[in-house]
Image (cartoon, helix red, strand yellow):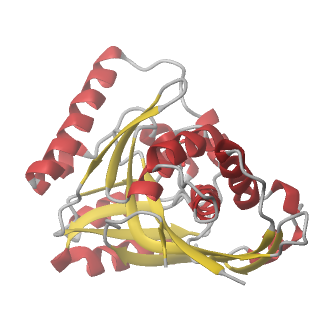
Amino acid sequence: MERIRVQVPATSANCGPGFDCLGLALNLYNIFTFEAEPKSNRFTYTFTGFGADLLEKEDPKTNLIGIAMEQVFAKAQEPIQYGHITSDTLIPPSRGLGSSSTAIVGGLLLANELISKPLTKEELLVIANRMEGHPDNVAPAIYGNLCCATGLKDRVLNTVIPVPETLHFAVVVPEVLVSTEYARSVLPNHVPFKEAVQNVSHASLFVTSLITKQLNNLTVALEDNLHVPYRKTLIPHCDEVFTVAKEKGAYGATISGSGSTLIAYADKAHVEAVAAAMGQVFTDHGIANKTYTLEADTVGASRV
Ligand code: HSE
């Protein structure tokens, strides 16, 4: 029986000022495998990696991988092919690194390999955006690189921008759980006009600085007024981590997605020291954490 295996990258949404529209893919992956069981009438699962014990206890009918697969079969108007799914979670879940988006995109890609006329990436993105609610994790999970995505009623406009190879990422994942739902509930209904204007300016500067490789601009371009000031109260010692990241040579740092992961943008020469210093802040305060030094993923979800 054919075995299909796909990998889907972690993603860091918002990129500072690009709330709900900018996201970049990182070279850390969740792996999903499908083995068809033609006589079965449901998806069954094996989980390994982060959170496997919790996932095993959940109702398989609610698993995003199988739900995403069903959406693809429905869109293609083909019968559902059931089977056994293995999910190997290497991306820390519920920490602002797009782990749930990988489950959606993984399911979409698995089913897309099974149908007779595969859907385009654009079509997969529409389904993923409908399931996820905002496109800034699912777009880079599908396309890799930096994505600028705008969800419209029935489609998603998305542009893909290469991330300069010299740009690296120091990532610290503290043992602090912040649900996206809660992290959205602390956001204000209104922000001062001047602050909104500054966000437009910073988001534009962020994107164009990556295009023109003017990475020193990131120190200013990563600054945000829409979510970081409100969310950093949910992540202990957030400001201290941002400060040490810059002291160790990062261009700047921000919250990854809705947190609690913090991400610093740095060059290759500094990234290791930046990551170590960021982790040390949490360690010094007795908070367990895991650090990564990552690069951009340039391919997006793919069969492996
Ligand atoms: N843009 C979303 C948010 C991403 O920050 O709430 C959630 O991962």
Q: Relative to 122, say whether 247 is above or below.
A: below
Say which residue appears at 28% left-offset and 18% top-offset: 194
Q: Relative to 159, say whether 102 is above or below.
A: below
Q: Quadrant of the N terminus?
A: bottom right
The quadrant in which residue 242 appears is bottom left
Q: Does 6 sit left or right of 75 as displayed? A: left
Q: Relative to 280, say whether 142 is above or below.
A: above
Seen from the viewer's position, the closer of residues 191 and 293 is 293
The x, y position of residue 228, in whole percent, is 43, 42
Seen from the viewer's position, the closer of residues 225 and 30 is 30
Say which residue appears at 24% left-offset and 62% top-offset: 246
The x, y position of residue 56, in whole percent, is 84, 73
The x, y position of residue 251, in whole percent, is 20, 59
Say which residue appears at 83% left-offset and 54% top-offset: 62
Outermost residue on the front side: it is 116
The x, y position of residue 295, in whole percent, is 31, 71
Seen from the viewer's position, the closer of residues 293 and 297 is 297
Q: How many numbered marks does the figure carry?
A: 0
The answer to whether residue 123 is visible is: yes
Seen from the viewer's position, the closer of residues 205 and 286 is 205
The answer to whether residue 238 is visible is: no
Q: Does 294 sit left or right of 87 as displayed? A: left
Q: Relative to 232, say whether 4 is above or below.
A: below
